[in-house]
Image (cartoon, rainbow, N blue to C red):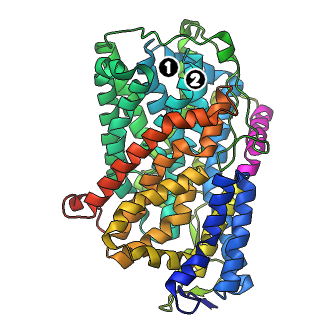
Amino acid sequence: MYVQDDTPLGGSLALSSLVAVLPLLTLFVLLGGLRVRAWLASLIGLAVALLVAVLAYGMPVGQAVLAGTEGAVFGFFPILWIVINALWIYQMTVVTGHFDVLRRSFGSVSDDQRVQAVIIAFAFGALLEALAGFGTPVAICTVMLIALRFSPIKAAVVALVANTAPVAFGAIAVPITTLAQVTGLPEDALGAMVGRQTPILAVFVPFVLVGLVDGWRGIRETWPVALVSGVVFGVAQFATSNYLSLPLTDIVAALLSAGAVVLLVRVRPPRRAEIGVGASSSSDTREPVTVASGGGGTTGDEPGTPRAPEGADHDDHSRDTRRDVVLAYMPYLIIIALFSIQQIPAVDDALGATTTKFGWPGLNVLTEAGKPVSTQTFTLNWLEAAGTILLIAGVLTALVLRLRPGAAVAAYGRTLTQLRTAIVTVMAVLALAYVMNTSGQTLTLGGLLAGTGGFFAVLSPVLGWLGTAVTGSDTSANSLFGSLQVTAARGAGLDPILLAASNSSGGVLGKMISPQNLAIAASAVGMSGREGEILRRVLLWSLVFLAGMCVLVLLQSTPVLGWMVVPG
């Protein structure tokens, strides 16, 4: 048995904090400063966390290792289980050529690049984030924009900035699931709270996108498109996360936003159809370099950059039959249908009956109050898990697209190959978080931050932003800082649900400047080694949005906007 102690070094919170911060400091320095590959940096950070737990906190070696194994298993199931199966579905659409059809279908909506930026980077990117996340939207949307004659640098910047508002609910809401797991707070309440923060961000993102494409002129001429897209997305994200279903949040928001824009463009197209941004040369449309998971370039928990669809050209969409277009959309319709069916009470109850909860074997940790630590209870919802639903969707997709079983299995194998270092990274980061949380290191840091009082409401989104900027993942940021946010909130007399949710909402704004996403974008446009140029174009927007989120959270922590906070 191990009993947590938040001041193991001489009863001093400050001295104990200097030691407790070492695992995070190691991870951040290796990733952000020395640019060590994420899988290696994560393993080194995990080793430091284990040493601190054993040597400084007096945690038995066996208990520390068991805490790490639980975190690693949780990193694979349910988190990576979602990503693997979602990327498998994408791979099958590429193999069958239906991804090309989908790209041409989007391009046929409008030849105005400002509209294309909103539909593809914002709306379709949100759908990809909902299904897979972990860098996938940036890779795919960048390729699609280049195929529609965006200049390489502009395609990369637009895709990165667009990948913000939907991130907290990405990969079938796995950041929220992770946040609930590490904090012990209700998943529905956390999702609902995030759904009262990121929708406000969503309203402004399309305006920034059209501005990036065509400056102030673009905003003046296409503001109705930007406004409709952002408002519809925001309202749908709020309503779905608060009243319908967390897994469906971004799916519903993305589809409604895209549908609203298509309808608006049909009724009232922007004043100018051609904006003269300059078509890219033929060399700009070549297939981008694939960033292999085990090679240089990207780091972090993104599942490797998927290859650009073969034949990424500017062919007229009229060559596609109606049947081709329907089949191109079928994988996404299948996913939506399956998750919708899952929301039926009788189906949900039947799936829930297969869920098993059990204490992690051999792990026996108590809080200072003598109660078992909540994170040592593992939930195995093998049939109800979002990843399993996606696996079923993948099988149905293979049947609908008439993909031979051998080809489908080969696509699955390629997906696992792309994800090999991502798997190590995610499992190591979750193991690190579990060791820190279980040993009491997170309690120590939370107690220190609680000393800032009400000002911690301003710092809360910054922590999430920093975590995502370094790790490249809102999920990882939540696993690292979620428990810390709750501890600090309680110590400062603030609402734990508000600040835990703020960690995720702030984290979405660090996505566009993370080295992992920058490397993905640069590789997709054939600009490897020029990540710094892309960073300079997106950094300001990341900071501006972060400042706005800090103000929002501060106001939500006061009576001014306190009515927006979800009851605990």
Q: Is residue 34 visible?
A: yes
Q: Is residue 406 above or below residue 271?
A: below
The residue under label 1 is: 106
Sequence-wise first label, 2 or 1: 1
Residue 167, percent across and down?
Answer: 48, 46
Residue 31, percent across and down?
Answer: 66, 54
- Tell which of 163 and 525 is nearer to you: 525
Residue 93, percent across and down?
Answer: 65, 28
Residue 407, percent across and down?
Answer: 78, 32
Q: Is residue 417 above or below residue 346?
A: above
Q: What main secondary structure does the magenta stretch of the protein show?
A: helix
The amino acid at mark 2 is: Met
Which residue is located at x 53 percent, y 26 percent?
329
- Horizontally, residue 214 falls left or right of residue 17, namely left
The residue under label 2 is: 144
Which label is found at residue 400? none
- Tell which of 194 and 324 is nearer to you: 194
Magenta residues span 405-422
The local secondary structure at tag 1 comes to helix
The local secondary structure at tag 2 comes to helix
The amino acid at mark 1 is: Phe
- Tell which of 42 and 78 is nearer to you: 42
